[in-house]
Amino acid sequence: MMKKIDNISFLILRIVYSASSNKLDSYSVFKRTRISFPDFSTIINKLKAMGYIYVDGIIISITNSGREYVLMYHSSYENKNREWRNVPQSMLGPKLAPNYKYVPSLRLLDKKLKSDLDN
């Protein structure tokens, strides 16, 4: 039975899994996760102890159980409905017709652009 892991650990597994040869140097993985190095080291050691990755020097490889974990649980880590991306109805205006001719306010244009238009 596979243990449930946190989002950062899953991100590391996904990064290594998506590499062309299922292996990547540890510095590249560290930079892509954007977490502190002590946290990164702790998570790498935890994943290694769980048997999801194999570390050979500076190269991190994903094991078969790590591949299986990524394939089995990838949908549970990706929230498909992101409420924060929805624009509130109060902020939506009427849709413009495709042939609507928009004329920008000259007052709001950049002064340099405005002088180029005048010439």
Image: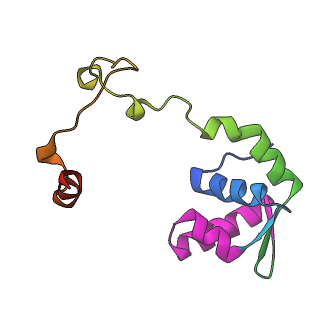
Is 31 inside the magenta-drawn segment?
yes
Q: Residue at x 16, y 58 (%)?
A: 111
Colour scheme used in the picture?
rainbow
The x and y percentages for residue 36 are: 50, 72
The x and y percentages for residue 109 are: 19, 49
Q: Residue at x 60, y 38 (%)?
A: 78
Q: Residue at x 58, y 71 (%)?
A: 31
Q: On the rendered image, what quadrant is the C terminus found in?
A: bottom left
Q: Main secondary structure of the magenta part?
A: helix
The x and y percentages for residue 35 are: 51, 67
Q: Quick check: 41 above or below 21?
A: below
Q: On the rendered image, what quadrant is the N terminus found in?
A: top right
Which residue is at the far left?
A: 107
Q: Quick check: 2 above or below 50?
A: above
Quadrant location of residue 62?
bottom right
Relative horizontal placement of residue 116, taking residue 13 as reference (left or right):
left
Quadrant location of residue 45?
bottom right
Which residue is at the far right?
A: 64
Q: Residue at x 29, y 23 (%)?
A: 92
Instruction: Find the magenta span and give its range.
Output: 26-54
